[in-house]
Image: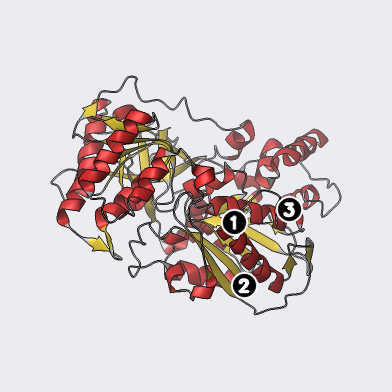
Amino acid sequence: MPTLKFSEDQAAAWDAISDNLAEAGVDLVDSLMQKPQGPSSSVMAVIGKAGSGKTLLLAELTKALRDAGVSIISGDWEGKKSRDRRTLAVLAPTNKAAAVLRNRGVPATTIHRILYTPVYDPHYEQIAEWLAGEAERPTVEGLTDTALDRAYASYQINASIPAALAAAGLRGSDFITGWKRREEPLDIGFIDESSMLDQKALDDLKEIFPTLVLFGDPAQLPPVQGTGGMVFEALPDKQKLILNRIHRQEAGNPILDLAHALADPWVDFYKFEQLVEEASKKDPRVVWAQRVESDLMARSPVLVWRNATRIRLIHAFRNAFDAPQDKLLPGEPLICDGIELPAKHRKKRLDLEARGLIKGAQVIYRGPGSKPGFSRLWVMGAEEPQLSAASIVKIEMEGEEEPFIPYAARMGATFLHGAAVTIHKAQGSQWDTVQVFGPDIYAAAQMGRSEAGQPLWKRLAYVAITRAERELRWVTRRSLARPTSPLSIDDLSAPAAELRLTTQEAPE
C-alpha cells in the first residue's frame, strides 16, 4: 500500500483491488508479475460521490502497477506484445474527462482510442520500435540523423511516439496509414466516469480487458440511451467497493459542501438556493450571480436542463458578440454531434474519432479550412487538439424545426453550438468556472419528477455544480452580460511538435 494515509474505506478498496489484481497475475505487495491465479475475467466497481477519493485511489493504483512493471497503454503506438508483458489502460468516456485525469498525472485516454488502434507505415514503425527500446537505431530514407535526434529527445520528455515523429518533421498522415478495431486484448482497464457507460460499452470493454475496475459516482445522471440505471449498479454487492467522503482532504470546499447538502431529504429547492447564497457570502469560490457572463460561455458552457433554454442562451451569446447569421466567428464553441460519413469512408471516420471528434466532444472553431466546407478546429481535452475536417454546423432556431446551417460539407463531422449545453451532455467534463442556470433547476423542481428515488432537480443540481473545479456561479436571473472583449483564439496554444502533426487537411 502507498505511504500516503488512506481513509478506512479507501484502504479497504485498495486491499480488495490488490487481491483481485494478484489473482490476475500482478502482485502489488511485492511489485512483481506472475501467472494469473484466478478466473479469466472480473469486474469490480469503486463507487463514491464527489470528494470521496476515487481519483486519488485510481492514481495511486496506476502508479503501483507501473512500479510493478505493468506497461501503460495510452492509445499511442504499443509495440510488440510479449508473452511476459502485462498492460494497463486508464480510460474515460470523453476527451475532457481523460484530460482531467492527465492534468493530475494519470496517463488516461478515451475508450474509443483504445477500441481502435493506429496502423503505422512500416518504415516509421522502425523508428517507433527504436524509441520504445525494442530495436536498434534505424536508417530511414528521407530522415537525417538530426531529425532522429529530435525525435529521440522529444520521446524522452513526452513518451509519445506521435509527438516524437512530429518533432522529426513528420505529419500524422506520413506515419499513420489508417485505424483498425483492436484485435489483441489488453490485461487491466481502469474506467473513470463509469456512470456514463451503457451496457454495450461495458460489453465492448469486457472483450478487451479480462480485469476491469470501474470508478463511478452513483449520484450522477444515468446514460440517456441506457435503461435507466448505471452499469455498476447491476454488479453483485461483493464486487462493489463503496467510498464515503474524505472530510479531512476536502475540508473547506464550498462546492462539495453544496453537492453533499443535496443528499439531505429536508433540503428543498428554496433551502438549497439559500445555502448557495450563504456560501457566496463566505467564500469567493461560490458566486450568487444575477446574470450569465457571456465571456465565460466561449470556453465554459452554461449548464441548463431544457433544450429551449439552451437555444435561447446560444442566440443571446451570438447576438452579444455580433456574430453574423451566415458564418461563425473564430473562437465560437461547438459540440460534436457525430460523424456523417457513408460506410465506404469508414477509415476516415475512425481517423476523426481517434483524434477526438467523438459525439459530445467540445470544440473551438478556429476559422475556415483551405477547402470548401472544411473548418479548422481545436478539440478541447484532446492530446493532439488541432485538426481540420469537413464540417456540418447546425445552429438550432427557437420555434423552428429546421436548424440554420452556416457551414455544410457534403459529409463529415456534425456540430451544434456549444455556448450552452444540457447538464446530461456535461457529464464527464469539468471546467475551472461553471455557470449553472438556476431558473432551469427551479423548473425541474416545480415538475416534481423523480429519478432512481431521488428528485430530478437534485440530480441535475449535483451533476451541474460538481463540474466546477474552482468556481461555481449560480445564475438566478434570465439576463446576459455584455462581453468585455471580442471573441478570440489567442488562448489556444499547443507545442510546436503538435502543430506540425495536425495541420494537414483531411479529405472529404
Residue 39 quadrant: bottom right
On screen, residue 444 above or below 373: below
Determine which residue is flagged by label 3: 125
In the rendered structure, the answer to whether residue 477 lies left or right of residue 387 reads left
Element class at badge 3: helix
- Whether residue 141 is visible here, answered yes or no, is yes
Residue that extends furthest to the left in the rendered view of this protein: 399
Residue at the top extreme of this rendering: 484
Classed neighbour count for the residue bearing mark 1: other residues with Cα under 10 Å, few (<14), some (14–19), many (≥20): many
Q: Residue 88, located in which quarter of the rendered image?
A: bottom right
Q: Position of residue 306 (x, y in %)?
A: 22, 49
Q: Measured from the top left, where is residue 48 in percent x and y?
A: 47, 58
Q: Amino acid at mark 3?
A: Glu
Disc 2 packing (10 Å; few <14; some 14–19; many ≥20): some
| Secondary structure found at label 2 | loop
Q: Residue at (49%, 68%) from the top-left corner?
A: 202
Tell me the SS state at disc 1: strand
Q: CA distance from mark 1 to mark 3?
A: 24 Å
Q: Which residue bears the numbered disc 2?
A: 210
Residue 90 marker: 1
Specify few, some or many for label 3: CA neighbours under 10 Å numbering under 14, 14-19, or 20 or more: some
- Specify the amino acid type for callout 1: Val
